[in-house]
Every structure is written in C-alpha cells, then in structure tokens.
Image (cartoon, rainbow, N blue to C red):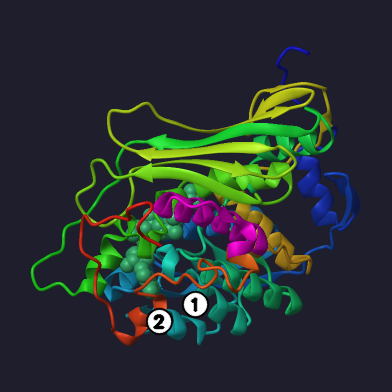
Amino acid sequence: MQKISNLKTSSISRRDFIKTSAAGAVTVLAGKSVIFAAPAPRKMRVGLIGCGGRGNGALQNCLDAGEHIENLELEVVATADWFKNKAEATGEKYNVPASRCFGGADAYENLLHTNVDVVLIATSPNFRPVHFEAAVKAGKHVFMEKPVAVDPPGGRRIIEAGELAKSMGLAVVAGTQRRHQASYLRTQYAIERGAIGKIVGGCVWWCGGALWYRNQNPNESDADYMVRNWVSFTEMSGDHIVEQHVHNIDVANWYIGHPPENALGFGGRARRKTGNQFDFFSIDMDYGDGVHIHSMCRQINGTDGGVREFFRGTEGQSMGGGRLQGRDISTPDFPEHKGPYCQEHVDLLNSILRQEPINEARNVAESTLTAIMGRISAYTGKMIRWTDITENKNSPWYNLTIRPTAEDFEKGEVDAPLDDIAAVPGRDK
Ligand SMILES: NC(=O)c1ccc[n+]([C@@H]2O[C@H](COP(=O)([O-])OP(=O)(O)OC[C@H]3O[C@@H](n4cnc5c(N)ncnc54)[C@H](O)[C@@H]3O)[C@@H](O)[C@H]2O)c1
C-alpha cells in the first residue's frame, strides 16, 4: 500500500473554471462535458422561510454567492417565520417591507404567494416535506436545509416533490454541504475511479457535546414551545442521528453509491432533561454484499468527540474528505467560493442561470431516510429494512407518522409529548 498522499489536481483552476463558464464555452468537469451558456444579466428574487441561525446564515451565503456570479442581481423580497418578530428582524436587515415579513403557521404560504424566484427553507426538519412540496408546486427554485423529514412518509414525500421539481425544470439544492466541498468532491471523485478499490467497510461519526435546550415558559402554547425547543423533540428534529449525523451518513451513501439494505442498532438516553430524544446511537448499516458501515453519534458533555468518516477499500483506505491511502488519481480542482456553505448557493444559482437545474432532493431524502431507519431500529430494537420504509406497504414502519405533524401545527392541534419520556427498545414502535 502506498503512503497516505494528497490527491493531485488537474489543470482546471477555479479561476479558469469561472472564466470558462462566463465565456459560454464547453469544458470537462468531473469527467463530464458541461456546457456553460453565457449567463444573461438577470435578477432573482430571494425569500427565506425559517429566520433562525442557519436561515440567516444561508441567506447571507446566497447573497455572497450572487455577488460572485457575473451579471446576477439578487434581491431579498420576503421573509417568513413561525414568529413574526423573527421574520421582521431578518427583513429589516435587507430592507424587506414589513408587509412581506410573514409570521405564523401559514407564513410559508404567504411567502410563496409573492413574486419570489428562489426560496431558502431553514425551519426545523418536521416542516420540510410540506414546505418543500408547496414551494415546488408554486414553481420556485429551492435551497433546503438538511435533514428533510422526520419519518418515512415525509422522506418519500420529498422524493416525490423532487421528481415534480425535475419535471418543472426547478433547481433543488440541499444543505448537505459536503457535496459542495472541494475536499469531499476530490475524494469522492478518486474513490469512484478506484483509488481505494471497492469500499468494504467503514465508520461514520458525529460525536460531541450536548446542544442547547429551552424550557416551556408559563402560558406558552405547546406549539410555540416545540418550535423553540425543536432540537429536543424527535417529532421536530428526527432525533440527532437524523438532524446532525445525516451529514456523515450522506457521505457514506454518496461514496458507496446507494443507501443501506438494512439497519440494526441501539441507543439510549443518559443526560437529557427536556424532550424525548436519545443521547447516543450505535448502528450497523448493512449496505449488502458484505459491506458494513458503523454509524455512531452522541451528544454528551465530557465525552470524546469527532465528526468524520472513514472508509476501508480492497486496495486502500480514506477519510471522508481528507487523507487517502491508495492509488494516486488525478482530480479536477473543484471550485469552492467562501467555503461549502456559500458554494452550494453558487452551484444552485449557476444551475438556474444555465438552465441545467441541479436536483438534490432524492440524495438528501435517501440520506434522511437512512438515518430514520437507524433511529427506528434503536428505538425499537428491531432490524429495519430499506424496503420497510420505502416499498413494503405492509411493513409497520412504512406509514410510521410521528405526531404532531406539520399539518397538526397548521390546524393548531399540538400537544407536546411529555418531557423526559423516551422510547423503550423491545416495547415501543
Ligand atoms: N447544514 C448545516 O450544517 C446546518 C447547520 C445548522 C442547522 N442546520 C439545519 O437548519 C435548520 C434550522 O436550524 P437552526 O439552527 O437555524 O434552528 P433555529 O431554531 O435557529 O431556526 C429555525 C427557525 O425556523 C422557524 N420556524 C420553525 N417552524 C416554522 C414554520 N412552520 N414556519 C416558519 N418558520 C418556522 C423558527 O421560529 C426559527 O426561527 C435545521 O434543519 C438544521 O438541521 C443545518
């Protein structure tokens, strides 16, 4: 086996890539011919649904991406949040009139009724299937944060809406930003071309400290409480195996080329006070043909951490977006403007301008469903098959819908689950 080596880069530099694309030439990227039409001067109107930490970050990333692309003008025209004051606070930063800063359960619908062209969706994940489907049906291009569902029907709904977006020529980019990160793109490119042979196993991690939590205020509705304290409730986040660890699971699915056939694992709750999530998970993801990936995640202070991926191949080994030990493969110099969080918007906007819309709905939905499969296994103690959540309508997991749903929130029918009551494997479904 060769020494660990950095991947080589080819002669297409980022500057050349941008120059070539602006000139409307044909070049080769990732082994594929790509036609870059000279972008016409254009203006795109942007709206944000979910004006929290990531939403505000994504909006700025999008505007930074717009500045980087020649002949493109972006304008923020509308904002929406469960809490109107949050929509207004973001709107104020970008001179959005108060009349287009929407609050409440139907805020997303009001935003979709404006003349917005591109919608960024960054609410808690439980709302994603309803909001994404509505955005597509309204004819909008979409950037949506990961994960994209909390249960199997939600994941399948994203896939269906993604297919509809495809048929309508709409672009869809997801917040699984490693797919827009140069180091990961180079590693994936090399692995796909045999740099480590066939992947036969590996491990993916998201282990770290506890996240924040919020207590319910006196007289606060259950709905408002769950929206504010969403990272503590499986109903809102999907649990942290879905909410955070989906990033690493997504890398495994991407590098291996398909989701696992089944998942069997366990987890538990050790330190949490609010909500009903587990604190740790350990799942064997069986990709078939003898390929196993160990997925592990933990949110407990004072424990050893790590956010990474490792793959063992028949002829080498590699970290997710880092050191690779195996055959040297020459790789293109993938562009990355201001980091992957901005590059994902560069890719989205360029794909709209070139009329070659990217569509990442299926990828992110499958990675979300993979994480959901692991969570169901840990909660129940059962082996969950991919077909149980995607095809087999007789499976008890196929229609597993966790409530309150996004529709329940819209109808005002929300009872928060009891705090500190978690699933018991062997007993619960
Ligand atoms: N890609 C990444 O690395 C990354 C990083 C952080 C967060 N995220 C994802 O971004 C999403 C948001 O996370 P955050 O950290 O910004 O959370 P946050 O709590 O800061 O923001 C969420 C916002 O959405 C609003 N909201 C909730 N339900 C809504 C609804 N039905 N309609 C309109 N607005 C609604 C909330 O009031 C809040 O302002 C999550 O899916 C999270 O997993 C991704």
Numbered circles on residues, count: 2
Q: Is residue 177 visible?
A: no
Rendered view: 425 above or below 392: above
Residue 239 location, quadrant: bottom left
Alpha-carbon neighbours of circle 2 within 10 Å: few (<14), some, or many (≥20)? some
Q: Identify the amino acid type marked 1.
A: Val
**Magenta stretch: residue 369 in it?**
yes
Q: Could you say where residue 363 lies in the image, as x and y percent from the top left?
A: 66, 57
Q: Is 409 positioned to the left or the right of 79 in the image?
A: left
Label 2 C-beta lies within 8 Å of the nearest ligand 1 atom: no
Q: Is mark 1 within 8 Å of ligand 1?
A: no
* Residue occupying image coordinates x 8% and y 68%: 218
Q: Is residue 240 above or below residue 314?
A: below
Which residue carries the number 2 mark? 407
Principal SS element in the magenta part? helix
Write the residue at 57% across / 33% down.
203
Q: Which residues are magenta?
A: 362-388
Question: Residue 306's spot in the image, x, y percent?
Answer: 45, 30
Name the disc covering residue 273, or none: none
What residue would you read off at disc 1? 130
Relative vertical location of residue 316 with respect to residue 363 in this rendering, above or below:
above
The residue lying at 81 percent from left, 29 percent from top is: 197
Give the residue displayed 28% in from the left and 28% down from the top: 302
Q: Secondary structure at mark 1?
A: helix
Could you tell me which quadrant the C terminus lies in?
bottom left
Q: Nearer the viewer, residue 9 or 24?
A: 9
